[in-house]
Amino acid sequence: MNKAAGLSAVLALTLSLITTPSARAQIQASDIDLTRFYLRLGVSFVYPDDDATSLKYYLLQDWELYRTHWEVEEDTTWNISAVWRPLPYAGLELLYINGADHSLTVENFRAYPGRDFIKFGRVASSSANLFVNWYMLDDDCLAQPYLGIGVNYSDFYDDALNSDFQHYLQDSGISTGPAKFGMGHSWGASAQLGIDWRLGRGRASSWMINASVMYTDANTDGVVTYPISPGYDRLYSDFETNPWTLNLGVTYEF
């Protein structure tokens, strides 16, 4: 099953769960509120997954690079989201996570005696997520846990190579000059488990404390382009960040 088919199946299952006849039967017309919105603002702790393939040539394989693997440093940034909750048990959320700055290291790198890594560079990543949220408890509860399934768009930018890796490419004779590093964008599935804790009984209080854990399927290509004589050559890698993200913040209900 490819990613698109898998994402469609998950969304279909989620929609079927939250729109079952029994659920609809419990919802009165007075419970529908098309003007109910949340605004969330908080901090995100982004923890990328290091499970990505090693750097490779397009045509040839370099043994010193082929055995390596990535280490991607975590970062902290901010997030903002808007939630439309027309039904007590269901809502739509659009969540944006601002650019997280990740330092990149190539591990298991044996070209230099006495070292097993080399500093590769850095990249920033931001993401936008659209969730279908299912709320598990009644509005009267102070705690409002929810489960969200959705789609993610991740953008990778401000990518740059470290001077350490630049020197390796030229000292080893792979490159005849400065190299450039580039990454693209990614579409994938995302899921979250969160809770809003209302600061007051019922809906009398508009303020809530929010916490959520999110998993994102983010996969793009990393490409290093460098000059040779004559022309250019490239190193490439599948770059799977697949981050876990912890979001903490405040929610205001309009």
Image (tube, grey):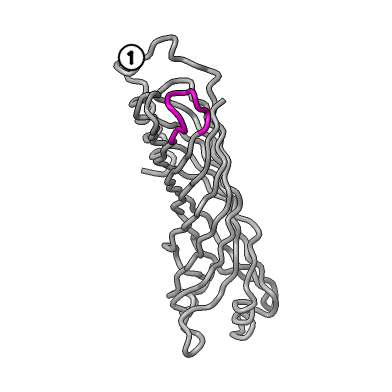
Farthest residue, direction left:
22
Q: Which sits in the foreground, 6 or 194? A: 194
| Magenta-colored stretch includes residue 202 | yes
Is residue 100 positioned above or below 197 on the image? below
User: According to the image, label 1 marks what residue?
Assistant: 26
Q: How far from the left and from the top, in percent, is residue 78?
A: 58, 49
| Magenta-colored stretch includes residue 181 | no
Secondary structure mostly seen in the magenta stretch? loop
Q: Is residue 12 visible?
A: no
Residue drawn at 44 percent across, 63 percent down:
50
Farthest residue, direction top:
29
Q: Is residue 202 visible?
A: yes
Residue drawn at 51 percent across, 36 percent down:
130
Q: How far from the left and from the top, in percent, is residue 249?
A: 52, 43
Q: On the image, which quarter does residue 190 sit in?
A: top left
Residue range (magenta): 197-207
Farthest residue, direction front:
200
Q: How far from the left and from the top, in percent, is residue 46?
A: 50, 55
Q: How far from the left and from the top, in percent, is residue 214?
A: 44, 46
Circle 1: element type? loop
Q: Which sits in the foreground, 74 or 126? A: 74
Residue drawn at 33 percent across, 14 percent down:
26
Q: Assign the N terminus to one quadrant of the image.
A: top left
From the viewer's perspective, tell me whether residue 72 is left or right of residue 164. left
Q: Assign the C terminus to one quadrant of the image.
A: top right
Q: How many marks?
A: 1
Is residue 25 positioned above or below 237 on the image? above
Amino acid type shown at disc 1: Gln
Badge 1: residue crowd in 10 Å (few <14, some 14–19, many ≥20)? few
From the viewer's perspective, tell me whether residue 37 is left or right of residue 216. right
Q: On the image, which quarter does residue 160 sit in?
A: bottom right
